[in-house]
Amino acid sequence: MEGKIFIEEGKDGLGYIVFDVRQRKDVNGLTLDMIGMDVLYEPRIVSGRYESCVICSEKIGIKIVAAL
């Protein structure tokens, strides 16, 4: 699996580590790999991209995204 990592600041005050992958199946697979973390939302379409988000602390979340 190939992808990019970058930082994104959210309107909610959280900082996000974003894993930008190529396919929806990669979003689904990585989300399943993170079972045990608090899920903010399961994979869905948000702002023109397919993404999921888990929280790893009170101030940092992890988003996994793929362009549509």
Image (spheres, helix red, strand yellow):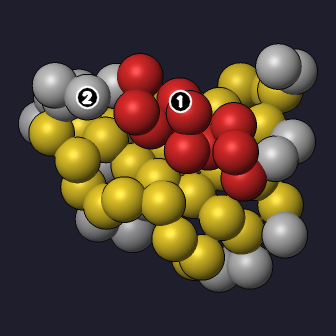
**Label 2 sits on residue:** 35
- The residue at 53%/29% (across/down) is 30
67 to 15, vertically: above or below? below
**Residue 1 appears in the figure:** yes
Snapshot quadrant of residue 57:
top left
Is 6 situated left or right of 46 in this image? right
Residue density around tag 2, few if under 14, some if 14–19, many if 20 or more, within 10 Å:
few
- The residue at 44%/37% (across/down) is 31
Is 54 situated left or right of 64 in this image? left
In three-dimensional space, the C-alpha distance between marks 2 and 1, rounded to whole angstroms, equals 9 Å
Q: Where is residue 6 drawn, in percent x and y? A: 69, 30
Camera-side residue of 62 and 43 = 43
Q: Secondary structure at mark 2?
A: loop
- The residue at 69%/37% (across/down) is 26
- The residue at 56%/33% (across/down) is 29
Look at label 2 and name its amino acid: Ile
Tell me the quadrant of the picture where the C terminus can be found.
bottom right
The answer to whether the residue labelled 2 contacts the one labelled 1, judged by CB atoms less than 8 Å apart, is: no
Q: Secondary structure at mark 1?
A: helix
Q: Where is residue 8 drawn, in percent x and y? A: 57, 45
Snapshot quadrant of residue 56:
top left
Residue density around tag 1, few if under 14, some if 14–19, many if 20 or more, within 10 Å:
some
**Label 1 sits on residue:** 30
Q: Where is residue 17 drawn, in percent x and y? A: 51, 31
**Residue 59 appears in the figure:** no
Look at label 1 and name its amino acid: Leu
62 to 27, vertically: above or below? above
